[in-house]
Amino acid sequence: MGLLAALRKRSAIRDYVRKLPELLVKDYGFSQSYTALQIKSTVERHKLSTEYIRYAISMYSDRAAFDQFHRGLVEQWNYDAIRGEVQAGYLPGYSHFSITDMLETFPDSAYGEGGSGSHGAAEGHANGDTSSGWGH
């Protein structure tokens, strides 16, 4: 992957982490998971990048919705690998993160009164630590 592609990917995933939770709640109300169509529609409606939509869907849908979304596509994606990549970059220590973790870890993107912003292991990343190379 070239430098420009890597930057586009990092920017898209950062938006999925920081902006998409609030937008999903605004569009559909709070839920522990959303359908792939809801996620895709919100991404498109709010003009976030669709290039890495598989990351957004793996983050905010369950495995069944993720598998159904990409069934029949030429490129096959690995749900666990994608979530692991997001977890390593933004939520270290949270192997089974949820939208609630995103809203609490990144209070600047939290819906309404939001979360506390303190999730221990993720605190360094929420405060600008870019040692993971994600550059958020």
Image: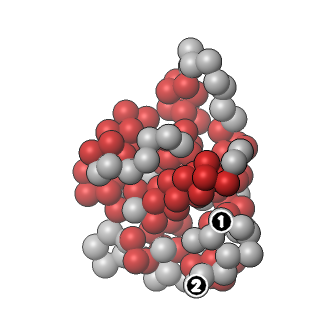
Provide residue 123's location: percent of width, then percent of height: 62, 82
Are circles 2 and 1 on residues that touch, CB within 8 Å? no
Type of amino acid at the residue the image marks with label 1: Trp
- Disc number placed over residue 134 in the picture, else none: 1
Q: Which quadrant is home to the C terminus?
A: bottom right
- Residue indicated by mark 2: 127
Provide residue 13's location: percent of width, then percent of height: 54, 55
Residue at 61% over, 48% down = 5
Mark 2 and mark 1: Cα distance apart in space: 13 Å
Residue 95 is drawn in which quadrant? bottom right
Q: Nearer the viewer, mark 2 or mark 1?
A: 1
Type of amino acid at the residue the image marks with label 2: Asn
- Asked whether residue 118 appears in the rendered view, the answer is yes
Residue at 69% over, 48% down = 2
Provide residue 66's location: percent of width, then percent of height: 54, 33
- Asked whether residue 13 appears in the rendered view, the answer is no
Residue 58 versus residue 19 in the image, above or below: above
- Disc number placed over residue 5 in the picture, else none: none
Taking the image as shown, residue 48 lies to the left or right of residue 58, namely left
| Neighbour tally class for label 1: few under 14, some 14-19, many 20 plus, Cα within 10 Å | many
Secondary element at image label 1: loop
Taking the image as shown, residue 51 lies to the left or right of residue 97, namely left
Viewer-proximal residue among 2 and 99: 2
Taking the image as shown, residue 130 lies to the left or right of residue 40, namely right
Residue 121 is drawn in which quadrant? bottom right
Viewer-proximal residue among 106 and 118: 106
Residue at 45% over, 52% down = 32
